[in-house]
Amino acid sequence: MDRAWTQQMAEIVKNTNEAEVIAYDVGEVRLQYHEEMAKMRITCHDVLSTVQALGADTELCQREGVALVQQENKILALSDEIKRMEASYKEKVVAVLEETKRLVELCDKTRDLDD
């Protein structure tokens, strides 16, 4: 029982640590996502101000439009990364819960055998 217990506890600790790392990474990506959204809003505001101030300077608007498309693509990629990381995080949490359940069941069986 001691060896099985130790192995299962090591697996639980490993899975828990991996889940914590993934949760931290998701938070970092989410922060980056919000920063990029703020940058995009500023850029949108700048574009509108520029259009009004310069009477729709076409070349500048095109450059800003390209910049917005690039930022949008980056934000969409970050959003996809968040989704992938959250899925991975959920898998790790489920694995930890399943391993914990197996451990409890093993302890119950061992206790029943000892009684």
Image (cartoon, rainbow, N blue to C red):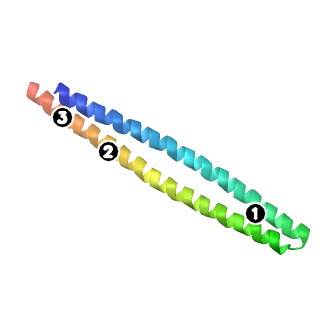
Of badges 2 and 3, the one in the foreground is: 2
Could you tell me which secondary element the residue under label 2 belongs to?
A: helix
In the rendered view of the protein, which quadrant contains the N terminus?
Answer: top left
Which residue is under mark 3? Answer: 106
* Residue type beneath disc 1: Cys
Rendered position, 7 above or below 97:
above
- Residue 64: x, y in percent? 76, 66
Dot 3 crowding, Cα within 10 Å, few <14, some 14–19, many 20+:
some
Could you tell me which secondary element the residue under label 1 belongs to?
A: helix
| CA distance for labels 3 and 1 | 59 Å
Which residue is under mark 1? Answer: 44
| CA distance for labels 1 and 2 | 43 Å
At x 86%, y 72%, the residue is: 57
Which residue is under mark 2? Answer: 95
Dot 2 crowding, Cα within 10 Å, few <14, some 14–19, many 20+:
some
Indicate left or right for 102 with 96 as reference: left
At x 41%, y 50%, the residue is: 88
At x 73%, y 59%, the residue is: 41
First of labels 2, 3 by sequence position: 2
* Residue type beneath disc 3: Leu
* Residue type beneath disc 2: Ala
In the rendered view of the protein, which quadrant contains the C terminus?
Answer: top left
Q: Confirm whether residue 115 shows in the render.
A: no
Quarter of the image for residue 45 reads: bottom right
Between 102 and 21, the one lying in front of the other is: 21
Of badges 3 and 1, the one in the foreground is: 1
Indicate left or right for 7 with 23 as reference: left
Indicate left or right for 55 with 102 as reference: right
Between 48 and 99, the one lying in front of the other is: 48
Q: Confirm whether residue 48 shows in the render.
A: yes
Dot 1 crowding, Cα within 10 Å, few <14, some 14–19, many 20+:
some
Q: Residue 61: which numbered mark, if any? A: none
